[in-house]
């Protein structure tokens, strides 16, 4: 039930064919988003796999393993030891709720991570031996990355900083001053960066001036003031990114501070300043990534899979930047400390992620059983869904496309509100309004708390309905 597009887009492909479906989907998507690459991949998957859920889960297992392998290869290209290279994908994927990208079907982030890692490998290859052929390949894959998800589109401006770090750590290309290093680098690769920033600004222009940001709620609500913005930042860092904030504090205490003390003893303040300057580009990079992702998700919340771009770069900072800068400053004694910190962190991750996976599997089984039960019980009338945004789209899609039950309405389209009606979840702004009274349901699909909320708002009487529970899902059948 976590991928409602399998049935919905599968029917369109059967009716219209692949090419016309892609044009139709892109035309509709341009009213809310700009994801040309994502839908090209999705429709190809649906065209080949149809609605065989075993093959779908098998495919996404393969994608997850490919992403892990590509991440490992990126770290090896950065000349990290094998144990640090293995740790990298575990840390950025499994350190929090973004782990759902490993197994949930239909998430663009799972595809985007793999394409991003391919971009990094192509970028490193291009930097080692620049050529037009390698540059063209890199530009094409980068454009594709930007068309999968907006959060990964925002990674394109970070490529110059990633490249500068790679040239410094691996290729030993640096000038006497940082500014001279940056200018020479930009001039040397001006054609590539011209292409990358053209792609970025064209995509941003399409999103701002053609698509609009009303649907995705992008950006900061300035009427909240400094206090509201501060609360958002505090909640995101202290809750959704708490593992990474805590790990970073350990990193400061056990990786940076001992090295700074050692350097100070060798050369005093002058060497400390030189050491600090080594972090200029890495810190600018991590600040840009976190700031851009926080801005993008300000209204929706930077949670679950939306954390992935940020967690990737936090992991890269500690595993790549700190590793190479400390080694360059002969602080190798911190490597053993780093080893223990990382694997303690991975153990904690394993304990958390195993619980998350078990919950996902159980919820999937409960949700599927619940929808099949509704299909068996349905003998006409309206089905009203009141769970949450994703499920309020997925459940109607499953019932309509798989079981041809068309009278399915949702209370949570655009967020819960009560006005006495449930609405067609596929209704576009230009369509005639299709809704039914909340009292006219023959079957209600809900959570315990959402039904209680509806009863409080409407006074709905369920005494003539039979209740059946499926884990946290509840159905009421007349």
Image (cartoon, rainbow, N blue to C red):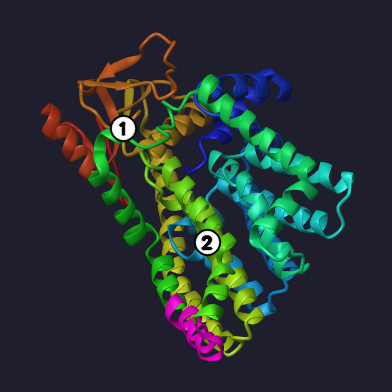
Q: Residues within 10 Å of mark 2 (few under 14, many from 20)?
A: some
Q: Residues within 10 Å of mark 1 (few under 14, many from 20)?
A: few
- Indicate the position of residue 445 as horizontal and vertical percent values: 31, 36
Q: Is residue 435 left or right of residue 64?
A: left
The answer to whether any part of residue 58 appears in the image is no
Residue under pointer 1 = 415
Q: Which residue corresponds to the image point at 55% horizontal and 34% vertical from the top-left? A: 5
Q: Who comes first in sequence, dot 2 or dot 1?
A: 2
**On-image quarter of the C terminus:** top left
- Indicate the position of residue 153 as horizontal and vertical percent values: 59, 41
Quarter holding residue 128: bottom right
CB within 8 Å, label 2 to label 1: no
- 253 part of magenta stretch: yes
In this view of the protein, which residue sits in the foreground, 375 or 5? 5
The residues colored magenta run 252-268
Q: Is residue 188 above or below residue 411?
A: below
Tag of residue 283: 2
The residue tagged with tag 1: helix, strand or loop? Answer: loop
- Indicate the position of residue 161 as horizontal and vertical percent values: 64, 55
How far, Cα to Cα, is label 2 from label 1? Answer: 37 Å
């Amino acid at each position: 039930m976590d991928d409602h597009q399998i049935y919905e887009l599968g029917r369109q492909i059967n009716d219209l064919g692949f090419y016309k479906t892609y044009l139709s989907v892109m035309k509709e998507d341009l009213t809310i988003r700009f994801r040309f690459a994502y839908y090209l991949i999705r429709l190809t998957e649906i065209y080949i796999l149809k609605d065989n859920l075993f093959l779908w889960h098998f495919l996404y297992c393969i994608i997850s393993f490919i992403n892990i392998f590509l991440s490992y290869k990126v770290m090896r290209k950065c000349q990290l030891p094998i144990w640090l290279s293995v740790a990298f994908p575990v840390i950025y994927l499994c350190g929090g709720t973004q782990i759902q990208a490993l197994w949930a079907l239909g998430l663009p982030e799972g595809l985007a991570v793999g394409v991003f890692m391919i971009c990094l490998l192509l970028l490193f290859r291009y930097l080692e031996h620049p050529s037009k052929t390698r540059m063209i390949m890199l530009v094409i894959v980068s454009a594709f990355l930007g068309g999968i998800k907006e959060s990964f589109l925002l990674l394109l401006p970070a490529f110059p900083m990633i490249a500068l770090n790679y040239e410094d750590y691996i290729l030993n290309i640096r000038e006497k001053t940082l500014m001279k290093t940056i200018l020479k680098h930009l001039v040397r690769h001006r054609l590539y960066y011209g292409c990358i920033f053209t792609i970025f600004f064209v995509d941003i222009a399409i999103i701002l001036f053609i698509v609009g940001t009303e649907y995705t709620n992008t950006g900061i609500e300035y009427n909240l003031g400094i206090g509201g913005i501060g609360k958002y930042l505090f909640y995101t860092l202290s809750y959704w990114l708490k593992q990474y904030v805590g790990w970073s504090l350990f990193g400061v205490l056990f990786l940076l501070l001992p090295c700074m003390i050692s350097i100070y003893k060798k050369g005093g303040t002058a060497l400390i300043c030189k050491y600090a300057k080594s972090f200029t580009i890495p810190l600018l990079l991590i600040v840009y990534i976190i700031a851009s992702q926080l801005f993008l998700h300000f209204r929706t919340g930077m949670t679950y899979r939306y954390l992935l771009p940020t967690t990737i770069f936090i992991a890269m900072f500690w595993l790549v930047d700190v590793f190479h800068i400390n080694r360059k400053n002969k602080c190798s004694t911190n490597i053993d400390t780093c080893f223990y910190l990382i694997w303690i962190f991975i153990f904690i991750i394993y304990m958390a992620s195993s619980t998350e996976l078990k919950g996902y599997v159980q919820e999937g089984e409960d949700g599927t059983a619940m929808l099949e039960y509704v299909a068996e019980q349905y003998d006409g009338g309206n089905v009203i869904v009141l769970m949450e945004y994703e499920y309020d789209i997925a459940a109607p899609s499953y019932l309509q496309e798989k079981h041809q039950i068309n009278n399915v309405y949702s209370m949570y389209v655009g967020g819960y509100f009560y006005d006495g009606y449930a609405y067609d979840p596929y209704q576009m702004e230009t369509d005639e309004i299709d809704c039914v009274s909340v009292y006219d349901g023959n079957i209600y699909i809900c959570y315990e708390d959402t039904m209680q909320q509806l009863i409080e708002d409407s006074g709905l009487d369920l005494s003539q309905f039979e209740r059946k529970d499926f884990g946290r899902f509840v159905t009421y059948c007349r």
